[in-house]
Amino acid sequence: MGKNVFVTGGLGFIGSHTVLDLVVQDYDVTIIDNLDNAFPEAWRRMKELAGDKAHMMKFIKGDLRNFDDLDNIFSATKFDAVIHFAGRKAVGESVQFPMLYYTHNVVGAVNLIEVMRKHNVKNMVFSSSCTVYGNPERVPINEEHPLKALSPYGRTKLIIEDIFRDVAAAEPEWRIILLRYFNPVGAHPSGKIGEHPVGIPNNLMPYVQQVALGQRDALSVFGSDYPTRDGTCVRDYIHVMDLAEGHVAALDKLFASPDIGCTPINLGTGTGSTVLEMVKAFEEASGKKVAYKLVDRRAGDSVAVWAATETAERELGWKTKLDINDMCRDQWKWASLYPKGYET
Ligand code: UDP
């Protein structure tokens, strides 16, 4: 019998790619998603991609803020572990509507932990973010770097990490891995699933994609006078397929390591790229011109962020295999096959 994993937010960008990887590795998966930022069409395409393993995935529409929904699911199925992706993730929105973030993200996580305790499921992989490092004091950023939140969104990630640290300290039978992602981009190599931002994209690569497709006029490059090789900010972009593999590696690690406690692990490539380098890579991959204008810096942006990857390599035996050209190639495939994403 394969192991049974409960995946929250499993129809979202990172969740959907990870779920597919899990079933390929013979995990049985139950997804919960409230469809706030995900689409039933994603589920349809995931089943298509899973082929004869589609029966290993199950989707339940539900919301983590509703404890009874969770309790019913956990009463019906015995899970071996949980991967917790669900949550809201837009920094700007979190400043405007902080309570949306504290209720969805923090209350959701608290309910999830409570239901796990009630049903004695104590293996957890959590979607954290490099945002918990605040404005980095040094790069590459390792997991010992001081933690600081710069927005309500970032604060929810940090609060949830703190809750997990407290729970693991009080109840040593828990095994928790906090995965701190850098900048996830790209799409499934089939082009069938990818990132579908709702409204105007906040993130760089979805915006670049829409400019290449002619859906937007020009990218605004936020700041061109930073002390970097071309004046634009540096980030550690990671292919969503590599990221998905990192989750499977983390899950395998939980089952192999009774004493892991609560351990944070960065998932990044260890290499930074500038905004203009990403634009150029996307132009090359797509054969399209990406018009851009240089504008003022965006408030709160850090100059340069990239990951130290030694912990992931040591603890998970995982490192990235794909580079920014692969990310742009796969994202362009998704964009050109489905210019409207999951809208049908
Ligand atoms: N960026 C940009 N124009 C945009 C969106 C983002 O120049 O329309 C820049 C942003 O300033 C940052 C990088 O692209 O340097 C990555 O931004 P994103 O919001 O994708 O990720 P994060 O800020 O969380 O690293």
Image: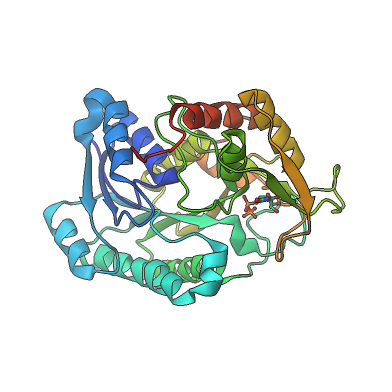
**Residue 150: which quarter of the image?**
bottom right
Is 311 on the left or on the right of 190, as rendered? right
Tell which of 153 and 214 is nearer to you: 214
Is 173 on the left or on the right of 265, as rendered? left
**What x and y, as percent, mark residue 295?**
78, 54
Q: Can residue 180 be seen in the rendering of this structure? A: yes
Is the C terminus in the top left, top right, bottom left or bottom right quadrant?
top left
Q: Residue furthest left?
A: 76
Question: What residue sits 47% from the left and 42% below the top?
Answer: 195
Is the N terminus in the top left, top right, bottom left or bottom right quadrant?
top left
Q: How is the image coloured?
A: rainbow
Tell which of 167 and 205 is nearer to you: 205
Does 102 appear above or below 229? below
All told, the count of numbered labels is 0
Q: Residue furthest bottom?
A: 99
**What x and y, as percent, mark residue 14?**
44, 44
Does 274 appear above or below 64? above
Does 254 appear above or below 143? above
Tell which of 127 and 233 is nearer to you: 233
Question: What residue sits 54% from the left and 53% below the top?
Answer: 200
Does 65 appear above or below 280? below
Is 168 on the left or on the right of 116, as rendered? right
**What x and y, as percent, mark residue 120?**
24, 61
**What x and y, as percent, mark residue 212?**
61, 34
Question: What residue sits 15% from the left and 51% below the top?
Answer: 77
Tell which of 202 and 6 is nearer to you: 202
Q: Can residue 272 be seen in the rendering of this structure? A: no
